[in-house]
Structures are given as C-alpha cells and as structure tokens.
Image: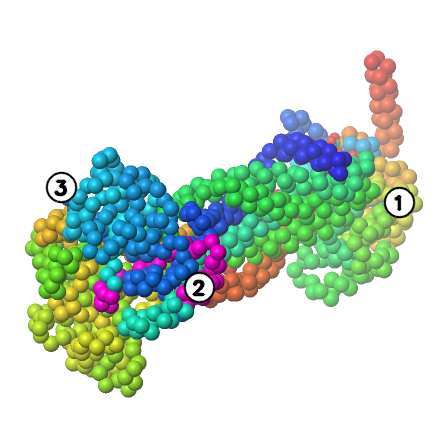
Amino acid sequence: MKSLLMGFQHEIKHSLRQLRRRFGYALLTIAVLACGLGATMYVLVAINALILRPLPFPAAERIVSIGDRSPENPGRLNGLPSQDFLDLRKELKSYEHLGAYYEATINLADDTEAQRYEGIFVAGALFEMLGEQALLGRPLNEADDRPGAVPLVVISESVWRDRFGADPDIIGRSLRMNAQPATIIGVMPSPFAFPRQSQVWTTARFVDGAHEDSQFWGQIVGRLKPEVSTDAAAAELVSVYERLKAQRMDLRRNLDGGLMPMAKAFINSNTRAILFIMLITAFSVLLLACANVANLQLGSLAARSREFAVRAAIGAGRGRIIVGVLSESLILAAVATLVALLIADAAGGWTGDYFARAEDSPGYWFTFQVDARVTLMAAAVALLTTMLSGLIPALRASGMALTRALNDSGQSGEGRFSRVGKGLIVGQIALSCLLLIGAGMTWRGLQARASFDLGIDAAPSSLLTARAAIFNEQFPEAADKERFFAAVTEKLRADSNVVAATAAEALPGWTAGGDDVIVEGQADPEATLEVFKSSVDDHFAETYGIPVLSGRFFDSRDQQASQAVAVVDQRFVDHYWQGQDPLNRRIKLDPEDPTSQWVTIVGVVRPLQLEDVDDDPQPTVLLPMRQSPVRFASIAVRTLGPPMAFAPRMAEIVREVNADTPIYWVRTLEQVLRLDGAGDRFLALVFGIFGLVGLLLSSAGLYGVLAQSVTRRTREIGVRRAIGAETGQVARHVAAGAARLVLIGMVVGLGLGVPWAKMLSSNALRMTSFDPLVFALVAISILASAFIAVLIPARRAIRIDPMQALRYE
Amino acid sequence: MSSNALITMRDIKKVFYTDEVETHALSGIHVDISQGEYVAISGPSGCGKSTLLSILGLLDSPTGGEYVLNGTPVQSLDANQRARIRNREIGFIFQAFNLIGDLSVFENVELPLTYRDNMNKGERRDRAMEALERVGMAHRVKHFPGQLSGGQQQRVAVARALVGKPSILLADEPTGNLDSKNGEAVMTLLDELHKSGSTICMVTHDMRYAEFAARKIFMFDGRVVDEETLHRLRTEEDQRLRQSLAIA
Ligand SMILES: Nc1ncnc2c1ncn2[C@@H]1O[C@H](COP(=O)(O)OP(=O)(O)O)[C@@H](O)[C@H]1O
Ligand SMILES: [Mg+2]
C-alpha cells in the first residue's frame, strides 16, 4: 500500500513534468475537458439550487404546500379559495403553523406619491412558519390578521431605502394601502422577498363565510409538527377536505385538496423534467469531451511508445504504467474542473439575473452558486472524467509497453490502436447529433412561438400596454368601474399622439379570464366547453386590429340594461356551428351559477389567442365591459411615435382620472410577449450552446484523429503515392475513412435522436417530436463540419512526397 | 541510342538545397537501359544511387537534363501524370519493404491495381494471385505484414511491384534489411524474373549481389564511372582519409 502511494506520488510528479513539456497539448486538453465539465457543473449548480439545497427556513423538511391537485398535472398544486384556509385551519391538527398568501400588486399612497409594488396578502401564521426576523419593527403575525382590523404593512428593505429614504422612524407610519388607511409595522431585511420578488406584505383579513365571488385564491403552506409524517398529514387533509367539500359544493365542486413538500411545489415536476433533460445533455457534452481527450491522449501516447517500452524493460509493471497515465489524466481533469467551476458560477449568476429580469424567478432564495455541495459533486465528476478520458489510453499504453519492448517494427498494433480511436469518433459524432437535435428542437420551438398567430393585426411593437387595478372601496358600483376605464381611454384618445386606445380584462398573448360555456339548445345540456373570455370595451377590436368576420363589434347599443350580448371568435363558431350562422344564437357562461344569464351573439371575429402562447388555444368569448365590469384591466394604446415614449403621459392621464390608481407592467406588447417566452429562450440558448460546443468538439476530435493518422501514416501515404496513387485517390482514401466513421456516427446519433426528441417534446417544450427539418439540418451541420475537419488533413496527405517511400531511417 | 531503349537519360543533374548548403547528388548522368536488361547500380554510400533511382522511378525530378521513358519525355509531366506512369510502367521494391500494415498480403498486392480506373475486381484478384504465385506467397494471402518474416515481406513487396506488369522493376537495396539467406532468396527471385523477361534496375552497395546482374553501373560522387576508375578513386580517398587522420 505504502509503495503504491509512493509510486503514485512519483507518477504525479513525472506527469507534471511531462505536461509542462507539452504545454500546448495540456492546454488544449484542459480546454476540451472544461467545455464538458463546465456544462455539467452548470447544470449541477442549477439542480443544487433548485432541488438539492433545502429551503432556508427552520425545519424546512417539515414545510408543506396545500393546494388543489390538478388531475392533468399531478406534479402541480393549484391555489385554493380563502374559505378553504379558514376551514382547514379549524380542522387540521398536524401543523405547528399554518398560513396562506396570495400575490397581488399593492398600491402604497401617501400625500406625495402613489406607487404600485409586488405584494403579498398574508393570512395566518405565514411569518411564524418562515421564521424570518424583521430589520425594523416586526413581521406580521397570526393575531394581526382579523377581518375588519386596520391593515398592517411590512415592507422590504429595498422599498424602505428607495421609497422612504431608509427613514429610521418608519415604524408606525400611516399611509393608504390600496385606498385604505394602513400602518407600517416592519421592514424585512434583504434579500427576503417571499415568495419570489415581493416588496410589500399586508394582512389578508379573509372574511369567513364570504360569497364565492369575494373569495381570494391563494397558496396554503404549513409546518408539520415534528411527530407527523408527510403521509399522515396528506391522509388527514384528504379526509378533512372530503368533508369540507360536501359542506360547500358551490365553492369546491371542482377542487381536490392535496399536499406536497413545499420545495417540490415551488419546483414542479415539469421543471424537474427539464433539469433532468439538461443534465443528460450536459453529460453528453462531457462524454464527448472525454472521448475527444481520450483520442488526443492515445495519439500523444503513441508518440511516447518508446518511453513506455523502456519503462517496461526496466521493470515497471502494468499497474504502474496505468497509474502513470491515469495520473496525467487526473491532473488535467482537476485543472479543468477548477476552470469549469468558475464557468458554472458565472453562468449560474447570469441565470439568476436572467430569470429575475424576466420576472420569472422561481423563489427569492434560489441562488445559482457554487457551494460546498457542488464542489463535492465536482470532485466526483472530476474523478469520473479521469476514468472516462484516461482509462482507455492507460490500458493501451500498458499493453503497448509490453509489445513494443520486444518488437520495434512499429507496424503491428497501430491498426488496433486506431480502431479504439475510430470507435471514439463514432461516439462523438453520435453524441453531437443528439446535442444538435436538442438545439434544433428548442430553436424550432422559439420559431413556433414567434410565428404564433394571436389573431391581431396590430404590430406588437406598436402597442403600449399597462395594467391598472381599481379598488372596490373607491369604485363600489359596477358602473363606477366601467366609467373609470371609459374615462381613461377617452382621455387617452384625446391625446394627439394616440391613434387608438382600449381597456380590456385580457391582454392578448398574456392573460385572459376563463369560463365554462353552454349554448342554447345543445343536445347534452350538461356538456360544457372551456373558453377564454374577456370583458372588453368598444375599441378593443379597432386597437388590436381584430377583423370582424360577421355581425358587429360592441358599440353604444350595448348598455348595462340592454340585451346581454357577446362576440365570439371563429374557433368558437367552428366548435358548435360548423358552417352555420352563429348570429343571434344564445350562450351562457358559467352555467352552474344560477344567476348566470343567456347572452346573444352579435358578432364573430378571427380566432384569437388571449392567453399566453404556451396554453392550448381555446375558443374565445368577448363580453362588453359595460355589461360585465372588471377591477383589473389592461390598457392598450396605439401611438403615432415610439410607444415607450408615451409611457409617462399614459401614467399621467390615469393619475388625472384617479390619483390612487397607478398603472404597472408598462410594456409594449412585444416586450410582454418576450417576457412570456423567456423560459423558452433560455432553454434554446442553453441547448444552442451545448449543441455548438458538441459540434465543435466532435469536429475537432475528427480533425485530431485524422491529422494524427496522416502524420503517423506519412510513409504509408508516400508508398501509395510511389506505386501510383493520384492526389485525388489519396484524398479520397483519407476522406473515405472519415466518411465511414461520420456516417456510422450519424446513423447511430439520428437513430437515438428519435426517442430523444420524443422525450424532449413530451416535457413541455412546445415542439413536434419528429421534425424532419431539424433532423435534416443536424445531418447537414454534421456533414459540413466533418467536411471542414477532413479538409486540412486531406490536403496535408496529398502533399506528402512519394520520396517518403524511399526514406529509411 | 538503341532502338529498343526503354530508358534514356542525358546529362541528368540533381542538386539539393538544404540550409544554404548545395549538395550535388548527381552531376551529369548518362544512362540507357534497354528492354529486358538487368542492371545493377553500385557505389559507396552517399554517391547518389538512391537519388538516381528515384529519378528513374519518377519519384523525384532532376534539376537538369533529359529523361525519356518508353518514348515519353517526362520532365514536363504534372504530379498526377507522373503518378499514372509510376502505376503502369514502374514497379518499386524498397529496402524497408514498405508493405501497409493495415492491409492483408492480398490487399497489399492488389493495391496498385485499385488505382487504375478500368480494372474490375475479378481481374484484380486474378492478377494479384498470379503475382503472389510467382513469388511463392500465394498461401499467405490473408496474413498481415506484421505476421510475416522479413524475407516473406520482401517477396510480397516484389509481387506488389510485379502485379501491374510494369516495363521496369526498380529495387533500392532490396536485401538491405534481410539476412544473407533471405537476401539470396530475393536475389534468386529477381534473377528468375529477369530470365522470364523482366527489365530490372537494382541499386546495391553490396558487390556480391551486384554480380547477379548482367550489367553493372558504378557510381562515385554523383557520376557514373567504370570499375577501375571506381577502384582508383576509392583507394585515393582511403589514403586521403588516412593522411588526415595521421595529421590530426
Ligand atoms: N532530400 C535530400 N536533401 C538533401 N540532400 C540529399 C537528399 N537526398 C539525398 N541527399 C544527398 O545526396 C547525396 C546522395 O544521396 P543518395 O542518393 O541517398 O546516396 P546513396 O543512395 O548512394 O547512398 C548524399 O550526399 C545525400 O546526403
Ligand atoms: Mg541509398
């Protein structure tokens, strides 16, 4: 044992000296390995941040999320109504703390200004469960949250600094929160932003027994008592929920209480699947890099065969020579791993920023950084890399040492030697096919998104949009709400820069309402259809450029008290009345609600996509805002000049109508759609980089092997020239060897690509599973890069002088 | 110039320029070789034998002079035309055998024929087998060069040189890598080939083997000399060498 260790130490020293002598080779190897390791470390950083690292809350393993189990996506929990929280709190016995929250923008107004923040309405013992201390004052607690109590407000450190100038006397300050008097009681230290990017927290003050329409839908979270298992808690929840359901069928008819660890609820199964795919992909890059390095090393060892022969002759055993070569691989892998960790850390930081900018952060506590766990995993991966890249060369070297010691002819063995290298090339080509298929499919997904038809003719870049929310307290009557938005759009239209302006519940391509619908006289009176729906004003079609195909759009005929009407899109018509006239037929939204009334179809528009592009298209129903007023609406204006330049004026106009109602999410529609595609673009970028690196590595690998083989076979090629091979024949001879490897690799890679593509497409990336264009482009890229890789060695081969045949050293 | 001259060389010169040193490897060589001749070129090491052979074999071009092979002046041919002539008119036998390690004995022998456009597989196989029969290696077709002795390898190399039915066989020290028993066997083989009509030009520095040839050409310092001149020049050089050693 001791002698083996001594031997190892000696071999490390020897390898270091060897590598210093072949510095360029060492650098190249490290760069290649760092590509593969960097990709792998990066994905490990993401997996560590999103899955492995525990939540930063006390007894985090006991924290669970409670929600509605969606049958079509069992890995997800949807929100529950506030009544569920109130009832569950009374019934559930398994929890130390139980809280609930919903996300909504919060408007803080004082005498000087009104500003909109990302807000959280907190019910129950949420802060007790999170266990976070305040920087100033105190967090909210369960006792604060009573219906009818004065709203209490906790702000984030950054709001405290930016809005209140870090005023030390902030605690106890009164202001208006969503048009109600409220008091600031605490400042939370950075980076606290539970759950994602929240800036203000306030008491929810849920009212027990409220009508279904006044329910808030949110997330319920709780920390289990130490002695309660997750399974037991789940069983308790299911039985309690069954009972609650029977009590209020009106509210809970479509709901099913379920529970999962909060860590899982935040990173749903879809994200996990994508991470898994990314890990496979990154590992493919690593394998490719290892194959590449193994080949480089085989070539460099061939040049050192005499050294191994001498070592064997003076008594080095097989084991010792293997250790010698592996120690070189170990040094290279270790250095490459350090480089890879730096790459992964930088890329991780960029990733966090990217999702924060895209307002799509999974949770404020997720930081994509290299930590101790990642470092430990990196060490394991480095060892694996050593084995993957070094073992074959080590075994070859030890074999070579023994044969070369006896036989110096240099002719035997070389055939077998390059056979291993050829196998590695085939593997590299196959892997790079898979990587390129991933890149191609994500790219096609982006393309599909970009070319997705929302059904509007106005250019997204020409529309300025913003969200506005008004408060029941200020606008108690339905008519007041409608009047507010009418006043705003009217004022906007009066501005000389505005071509058209509208307010609507929906923002096409981003958000809309959803509802069930039936049509009058349908065969099965129970059968409902899910639709997207939106309350819109009279200028919706004009502003977004939505052609009316038949009938009319809403106008002054549609008053609150006049006949209830609707406009549907062509998709709706096709679903129910293929080829028949839909005008004057009647439909009913939310038929299970006894107060719902029939509405008459007065117009048909082109198929619309009101929800985001990721949602499957559904038939769409539009209602006049005067007949179904809303609190939240998206204002959109088409301007003469650049839309973003109009943003300040838009804010001013809204403020002029009502000072308590600021606008938020001020973006062009183009920006809205870009934000929506941030996840897809991210994947396309990552897969694109992996694909490019793969292509680069595999063609570099092919080039390396060919170049080495041409060098090694200088004399052979000289002989071929001497016995009459023309330049074309020599070039063809070199290329033919490569072409065979490339074709075999491509057949393997594209063959494996079919199930791989299926796996990619079944995990939410909006792609067709078999896209012939992608496969064709992959084949072309592989062939083109292989052609370039072959070109230089082939040119060198045809320049070999036939005189080489005569040379005898 | 005789009417059946296969090779005519006039005033062939070859200068190598390396690191600003001019080496006059050949300085005005006149050689004619006729159909069916067996010529041995001999002379001390470095006198230009291999250089001459490589020019004869179109592996290299002279820096000056005229060379007509089989009625064709070859100076102005491009690389591919020269390759085609090497393939059809010339068979090479090298000191180091130069068989290709990855190819079997049969494939090695077949190789020159694969560079011809108009020969089908069956024809190639028949020709290769015939050549292997002639050198007595037909029983080793599936072997690889690494599995053969040096003498056997050289016989395969001779078969490869023969297979294209060249006008002339060129051999550069064909016995240089062989022990005397195997060396003599190869010489016997060449002798047989000559007797059956082959034209052979062989380079050797070993006078024993030069005796096999009907005609001997002696070279010294890049020139063709007769046997006595060679002998005198060598003696003089030996004396110069001894003197310089004595002075030192
Ligand atoms: N490629 C070359 N570059 C420079 N000098 C060369 C080259 N080939 C041969 N020579 C020189 O030309 C002379 C003749 O060489 P060579 O024909 O190989 O002699 P031989 O075969 O008779 O031993 C020698 O001095 C040799 O060093
Ligand atoms: Mg020589």
Residue labelled 1 has its Cβ within 8 Å of some atom of ligand 2: no
For residue A112, the mark is 3
**Of the pair A477 and A12, the residue shown nearer to us:** A477
- The answer to which of B217 and A299 lies nearer the viewer is A299
Residue at image position (77%, 43%) is A318
At x 78%, y 29%, the residue is: B221
User: Which residue position is annotated with label 2?
Assistant: A234
Quadrant of the rendered structure where residue A154 is? Answer: top left
For marks 2 and 3, give the CA distance. Answer: 49 Å
For disc 2, the chain is: A
Q: What chain does mark 3 sit on? A: A
- Residue A292 falls left or right of residue A212: right
Circles 3 and 1 on the same chain: no
| Number of marks in the rendered image | 3
- Label 2 sits on a secondary structure element that is helix
Label 2 vs 3, first from the N-terminus: 3
At label 2, counting other C-alpha atoms closer than 10 Å, the crowd grade (few under 14, some 14-19, many 20 or more) is some
Q: Residue B233: percent from the left, percent from the top?
A: 84, 26
Q: Do the residues at discs 2 and 1 belong to one chain?
A: no
Q: Which residue is at 17% across, 73% downward?
A: A566
Vertical relation: B95 (above or below) A739:
above
Indicate the quadrant where residue A311 lies.
top right
Is residue B127 depicted above or below A243 in this figure? above
The range drawn in magenta is A209-238
Q: Which residue is mark 1?
A: B183
Whether tag 3 and tag 1 are in contact, CB under 8 A, the answer is no
Query: Which labelled disc corresponds to residue A92?
Result: none
Q: CA distance from mark 2 to mark 1?
A: 92 Å
Q: Quadrant of the N terminus of chain A?
A: top right
Q: Is any atom of residue A79 visible in this view?
A: no
